[in-house]
Image (cartoon, rainbow, N blue to C red):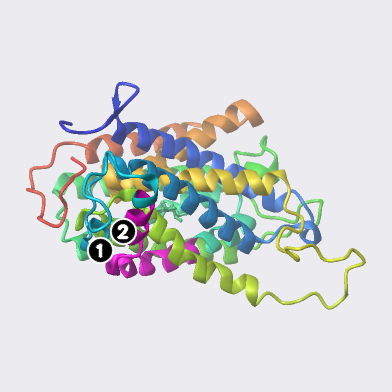
Amino acid sequence: QEGQPMLFGMPLKYVSLLTLAVQNAALSVVMHYSRVSTPPSLSYSPATAVLLNEIIKGSISFVIAFLRTSSNPPTSPSARRFATNFANASWFSRLRFLLAEIFAPDCVKLSIPAILYVIQNSLQFVAISNLPVASFQVAYQMKILTTAAFSVALLGKRLTNTKWMALFFLALGVGIVQIQTSTGSSASVPRDVVGSAAAAAPNGHVMNPLKGFAAVTAACFTSGLAGVYFEMVLKNSKADLWIRNVQLSLFSLIPALVPIIYAPKPTIPSPVPPSFFGDLFKNFGGWAWATVMIQVFGGLVTALVIKYSDNIMKGFATSLSIIISFLASVILFNFKLTPSFMLGSTTVLVATWMYNQPSVVPPTPAVTISSG
Ligand code: C5P
């Protein structure tokens, strides 16, 4: 597309969509493993992971936003008073400009998606601790439908018949893949990584699929609403994406801190003296850090996808991640490709191609960068 930023000779839109697909596949495997590979008594706190995710993501966004101040004209009047010529401004005036931009009155708009994302990120931990990876990933695809519904309702987006049909085929493809998952042809796969039926792992971790499905369904709704709301804020204002990300992380800190502050205190005092951070980093090992870092990366790529593409396309990218994680299972876990898997994944690919066909419906004024 004309005017689209490029990376490695490819439009950033496609690079970010592909990256997101790979990131999603990696996240579900690593996150699931980080939760079920230890007995419950040795598991880490998801609340800490959610909080760390926001702190790290917010800090990275802040640094990027700061580096961009020299090329980015300020949009809010409160920020404009700090410097006129940003190319030659001192770092101190650039910092003051950035802070004024971050705390501009319209930052409150980000409070809604911030709260929704914290709820979603917490629900994701519940879901992935109680469902096998494949079932989780397939069920999480329902967010494509919730996102489409919220895009139509809130952004006034109009979908052509082809796009509605693409959504239908996507649901169909996901359903076919799910049949493959639930019929247990993943028997050759280690059960606690990509396996089918939920059961108690040898280490005592018990999965509760009903709880998992309830959490994943709720997460689909928050995902659709938060994503569309963020898109609305981003595309209806001139503020820089990275400044919006900092605002999003700042507002997330409040709901992310609540479960940590109100966490029940252990009744039996630990023989080890409490550290400066208390129980915050208890059992927080390599897999927990890997989960957080993949999540941080995913959050940043998600923001790029929402800016340069749109939320519905983001859904299609993540549905491709089902295929990537299944293919990874073939290589890593000797997973057998069945005809139903091939049919389901081909349907998903065709649906993605169909959705990406040029639209004949003119874009609505609210959406300036369309997916088509
Ligand atoms: O599943 P879904 O694509 O809705 O997940 C979005 C994820 O991306 C959430 O974890 C959310 O915290 C993150 N995100 C972000 N920054 C944005 C938008 C989303 O970190 N600007």
To which residue does mark 2 refer? 101
Q: Secondary structure at mark 2?
A: helix
Left or right: 204, with 172 as reference point? right
> Residue drawn at (76%, 55%), measured in percent from left and top?
283
| Extent of the magenta region | 94-120
Q: Amino acid at mark 2?
A: Glu
Give the crowd class for mark 2: few <14, some 14-19, many >=20 residues within 10 Å.
Answer: many
> Residue drawn at (21%, 42%), measured in percent from left and top?
371
C-beta proximity under 8 Å, tags 2 and 1? yes
Viewer-proximal residue, 48 or 186? 48
Left or right: 100, with 298 as reference point? left
Left or right: 56, with 101 as reference point? right
**Residue 111 covered by magenta stretch:** yes
Image coordinates of residue 263 in percent, x first then y, are 68, 74
- Please identify the dominant SS of the magenta region: helix
**Residue 115 covered by magenta stretch:** yes
Image coordinates of residue 311 in percent, x first then y, are 30, 50
* Residue 78, disc: 1
Going from N to C along the chain, the mark reached first, 2 or 1, is: 1
Q: Amino acid at mark 1?
A: Ser
Left or right: 219, with 99 as reference point? right
Which residue is at the far right? 271
Quarter containing the C terminus:
top left
Viewer-proximal residue, 5 or 218? 5
